[in-house]
Image (cartoon, grey):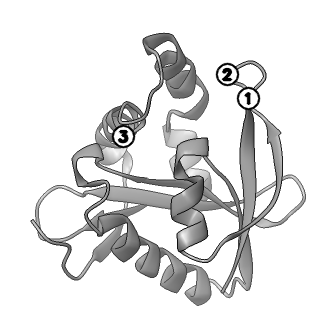
Amino acid sequence: MKPQDVIIKQADSQDIAHINEMMLHSFSYWSYTQEELHKIMDLLHIDEEYLTKHGIYLAHYDKKDFFGFFSFIKNSDQENQLDYFLIRKDLIGFGYGQKMWEVCCDKAKSCRMKDFIIISNPYAEGFYQKMGAKKIGSRPSTIRLGASLPVLKFSL
């Protein structure tokens, strides 16, 4: 499979279970323990309230199931933040993330964003830097004691 033109659609409540399932499988690509994966899902799972408040965009490459999703929020400092950006774990490293990134940035521009913050999974930091994001700091992880999460900024 090769990445093709990405089609974006707004998620609805019927997609929530599939989004959470994909999130769990995507994070399992990295070297998280089962306990850490449970903590991640407790912290990051999507529910109806999140979907209604922020919206989620699903990335499709055909008319079948979506291969990834992303969403933006306004963080506590009222900055635009890329809150989720995940693809199926079997597609990591094959160009799908880059294709979805392009569409994600187009969506941000259409929402009149000039930039956005990313609080990254440490394993994904290199991807975001490759896409042009700049590291601006870090914050403590709530999953791994003593670990930190990279904070990046992407200018459109």
Percent x, y of residue 20: 38, 36
Q: Quadrant of residue 24?
A: top left
Alpha-carbon distance for marks 1 and 2? 5 Å
Which residue is at the front of the view, 131 or 48?
A: 131
Cβ–Cβ under 8 Å for marks 1 and 3: no
Pointer 2 residue: 144
Regarding mark 2 in the picture, which secondary structure is present there? loop
Estimate how packed mark 1 is, as few (under 14), some (14 to 19) or many (20 or more) residues with alpha carbons within 10 Å. Answer: few
Cβ–Cβ under 8 Å for marks 1 and 2: yes
Which residue is at the front of the view, 10 or 28?
A: 28
Percent x, y of residue 42: 56, 22
Q: Give the vertical position of 141 relative to 86 (above or below).
A: above
Pointer 1 residue: 147
Callout 1, which amino acid? Ala
Indicate left or right for 87 with 120 as reference. Answer: left
Percent x, y of residue 99: 34, 76
